Image (cartoon, rainbow, N blue to C red):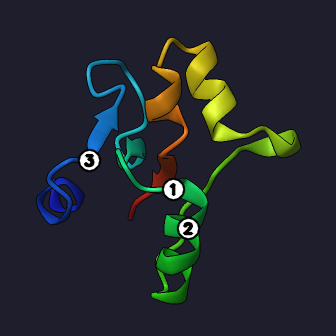
Amino acid sequence: SGIVKGFSGATVLFQQVERLPNCCAIAFPGVISDALLFLLHRKGIYASLGGGQCQKLSHILIASGVDEVLAQCALSFSLS
């Protein structure tokens, strides 16, 4: 909820499905995910663009039925 408060356009993906409570994929419409990932890293906030075996998060999201434009601006977070 804090991320959505900080960026009102943020979309938390898969909110209504069973998943680990601390893991989430969040899309930031209008923001290039590579650039956001770089800026967050510089602030000490670590997110991800993909999973194991060099999978890109956007490809996984598209395969899961997420809109392609939204998938291109998403990052994966594991919050503690």
Please tell me which residue is depicted at 61% across the width and 56% down the height of the picture.
48
Cα–Cα gap, marks 1 and 3: 13 Å
In this picture, residue 48 sits left or right of residue 6 = right
The answer to whether mark 1 and mark 3 are in CB contact below 8 A is no
Q: How many marks?
A: 3
Sort mark 2 into few (<14), some (14-19) or many (20+) by Cα contacts within 10 Å.
few
Q: Nearer the viewer, residue 39 or 25?
A: 39
Please tell me which residue is depicted at 50% across the width and 11% down the height of the picture.
65
Q: Which residue is mark 1?
A: 32
Secondary structure type for disc 3: loop
Image coords of residue 28 (percent x, y): 36, 49
Q: Which residue type does callout 1 highlight?
A: Ile
Q: Which residue is mark 2?
A: 35
Image coords of residue 39 (percent x, y): 50, 79
The answer to whether mark 1 and mark 2 are in CB contact below 8 A is yes
- Of labels 2 and 3, the one closer to you: 2
Secondary structure type for disc 1: loop
Q: Is residue 11 above or below residue 10?
A: above
Q: Which residue type does callout 2 highlight?
A: Ala
Q: Earlier in the sequence, mark 1 or mark 3?
A: 3
Q: Which residue type does callout 3 highlight?
A: Ala
Q: Quadrant of residue 29?
A: top left
Cα–Cα gap, marks 1 and 2: 5 Å
Image coords of residue 80 (percent x, y): 38, 65
